[in-house]
Image (cartoon, helix red, strand yellow):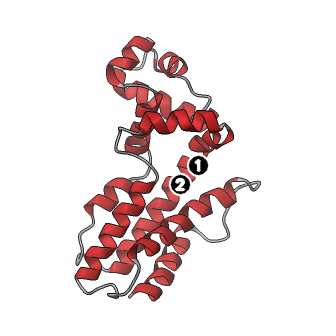
Amino acid sequence: MDQKPTRVRIVDAAHELMLSIGLARTTTKEIAKAAGCSEAALYKYFSGKEDLFVTVLAERLPRLGGLLTELTAGQGTVEGNLTEIARQAALFYEQTFPMAASLYAEPQLKRRHEQGVGGLEAGPHLPIQQLDAYLRAEQGAGRVRADADTYAAASLLLGACAQRAFAYAALPGGEPPQSLDDFAASLARTLLGGIS
């Protein structure tokens, strides 16, 4: 028997199931079974599958949200910061895409999921808002052009990272033409050329 605490086993099981069969097909009953606990025990820690999904995103995937909230204008270089954001975002979306893609196949399920995460301070819009806030702070520090549209810049960077995950996940082998590090550096450099 796994000696990890119950909560850790539940999050591990949710992560594995969401990756292998998708969020839409994963049930709390299956998660509890895979974690070696009862469904009632699962509900002692989590309000439901949506709460678990948000926890998996925060605790088991590359730290996009944490990175974005820790950024401080004036620290490091803007290019270096954007490169690391692009790197983590590309990894995050690469791992999130297989989990969440199944939601878009069933509109009713997607609506139910949106209602479930509504009160959890989560959603795909948050990284854009966080990156926009960082870029506005850099704008205030004079390191981003005063007339630059920081929301558009944040959307472009994160959108490119999400598109990379989507575009190559469908291909046999799923390998993008550029390494992750080259992609992140090129994306940051290109974006910075338009806003600095």
Residue nearer the viewer, 168 or 192: 192
Mark 2 Cα-neighbour bin, 10 Å: few <14, some 14–19, many ≥20: many
Number of the label disc, if any, that sits on residue 174: none
Find numbered disc 1 in the image and state the secondary structure of the residue it sits on.
Answer: helix
Residue nearer the viewer, 169 or 136: 136
What x and y, as percent, mark residue 145?
A: 34, 88
Q: Is residue 121 visible?
A: yes
Determine which quarter of the picture holds residue 43: top left
User: Is 85 situated left or right of 75 in this image?
Assistant: right
Above or below, 83 against 164 in this view is below
Q: Quadrant of the C terminus?
A: bottom left
Above or below, 11 against 77 in this view is above
Find numbered disc 2 in the image and state the secondary structure of the residue it sits on.
Answer: helix
Residue corresponding to mark 1 = 97
Q: Quadrant of the N terminus?
A: top left
What x and y, as percent, mark residue 167?
A: 68, 60
Residue nearer the viewer, 4 or 14: 14
Disc 1 and disc 2: Cα gap in Å?
6 Å
What x and y, as percent, mark residue 54?
A: 41, 39
Q: Residue furthest right?
A: 172
Q: Do the numbered discs 1 and 2 sit on residues whose CB atoms are within 8 Å?
A: yes
Mark 1 Cα-neighbour bin, 10 Å: few <14, some 14–19, many ≥20: some
Three-letter code for the amino acid on which mark 2 is drawn = Tyr
What x and y, as percent, mark residue 9?
A: 41, 25
Number of the label disc, if any, that sits on residue 93: 2
For the point 33% across and 59% down, the residue is: 67
Q: Is residue 76 visible?
A: no
For the point 61% across and 63% down, the residue is: 164
Three-letter code for the amino acid on which mark 1 is drawn = Phe
Determine which quarter of the picture holds residue 5: top left
